[in-house]
Image (cartoon, helix red, strand yellow):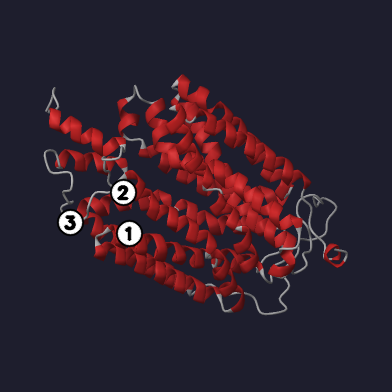
Amino acid sequence: MKDEVPAELKELKGKYLKGNDEGKTKLLNEHYAKVKVLEMAGKPKDAKDPDGWKWLTNAEASWPYAICVILFAIFMIPGGRIQDKISPRFGATLGGFLLAAGCILAGLMKSYTGLLLGFGILGGIGMGIGYAAPTPAALKWFGPHKRGLIAGIVVGGYGGAALYISPLGEWLIEKYGISGSFIGLGILFAVVVIIAGQFLIVPREGYVPPMPPETASNNKKAVVSHSEDWSPKEMLKTWQFYALVLLFIGSTQSGFLIISNATGLLKITAFAIPFFAMNAWILASYGGLVNASGRVNTGLYSDKIGRANAYTINGIVSAICLALMPAIMASKSIVLLFIAVGIAYWQYGGGLSLLPSYTADFFGSKNLGVNYGLVFLGWGLGFFMPALAGKIKDLTGSLDLSFYISAVILVFVVILGRLIKKPEKKQLRSA
């Protein structure tokens, strides 16, 4: 097969990777699918993977992840309630257990149903409950002058996971198969999350976080110095809550657009460079590093220059890069692509440190778990953009229009971010 590919292999490869009605593909990633296509040359289309898994259509493969994302966002709300009313330790333990159980269940069932139940449902619920525990708990210990940095450090761990989970997952698949990788990751998640969760505690009632020293050099525009505590019911009556949800949607939709297409963008741009064309995962791993860095550093400078200013800088620069993305891809410049994609990842990661800080600044720390859980719905709603981009690509053959739409949305939410002000309880009494 050095110079010529058998006709039956061409046909099989085309069906497996193009994603038409009859075509089938492996869930995990395109590289793995290609390997399996070569292995299964000449086998019937309903053949199973050596470890018992059936092949999935592209549509089937997308559903477990979609369900996971939706439930992740929804269960941030009860997860936040658990963090506020019971303890972050219990929330982290429960979330870690459910996520681990979901992965192990998917590995043992070796079926599409198991994938939906295990990864999609149990995994999504577990991640939502578990993710709601650490950030609010950490923020309750610190004053507003450090909220951005603390939120960035906490959520930076989530973004940085892409650096090791992807290569670890590929190694586990190659060594132990798909089932073994699910079970192995499930055990890892159980050990790490449940043990780490035991260190999460919140301050005693009546605790007042330290404030920055009053000096003439303090930047009055940086962050608010005091926040009233709002109940979820009170928060839902303010327009600022819905504005924060829109800010979250705007930030995440552009990030999801890049994240879901990072590998494809590099393949198109670096088509003439074999190394990058065959190792397109490099851009996604690079993005994971920048994503984590953006969370920490955006939080840091938002404490210095203010949340709105930080959101504006990230949003405008990212919008410019999105608008230029079609031209960058046409230029075939790898350097420009890495810069533009890196900025998009930075903006997305930055939003995940800004929004919990915004929520604490506006609505206080007492009910921060459930309040941020409600604001976090905007993260899940931002998932519309990859779906819209897929439709646009089917109709036009490219993602160009998607980049332009995403850039316009970012500009809109940046303007909204300049208008939003801290709510006051008297606006409820006058309503």
Q: Which residue is mark 3?
A: 51
Residue 282: in sight, yes or no?
Answer: yes
Q: What kind of residue is marked 1?
A: Leu
Assess disc 3: are there few (<14), some (14-19) or many (≥20) residues with their C-alpha within 10 Å of its C-alpha.
few
Q: Residue shown at 36%/35% (left/top)?
A: 280
Residue 184: in sight, yes or no?
Answer: no
Q: Tell me: 109 left or right of 311.
A: left
Position above or below: 195 against 412: below
Q: Tell me: 106 left or right of 408.
A: left
Residues at badges 1 and 3 in contact (C-beta under 8 Å)? Answer: no
Q: CA distance from mark 2 to mark 1?
A: 10 Å
Which is more toward the observer, 327 or 13?
Answer: 13
Q: What kind of residue is marked 2?
A: Leu
Q: Measuring from the top left, give residue 151's x and y in whole percent.
A: 60, 58
Q: Measuring from the top left, give residue 138's x and y in whole percent.
A: 60, 66
Q: Which residue is mark 1?
A: 115
Which is more toward the observer, 130 or 43?
Answer: 43
Which is more toward the observer, 266 or 147?
Answer: 266
Residue 9 image-quadrant placement: top left
Q: What kind of residue is marked 3?
A: Asp
Mark drawn on residue 27:
2
**Number of marks drawn:** 3
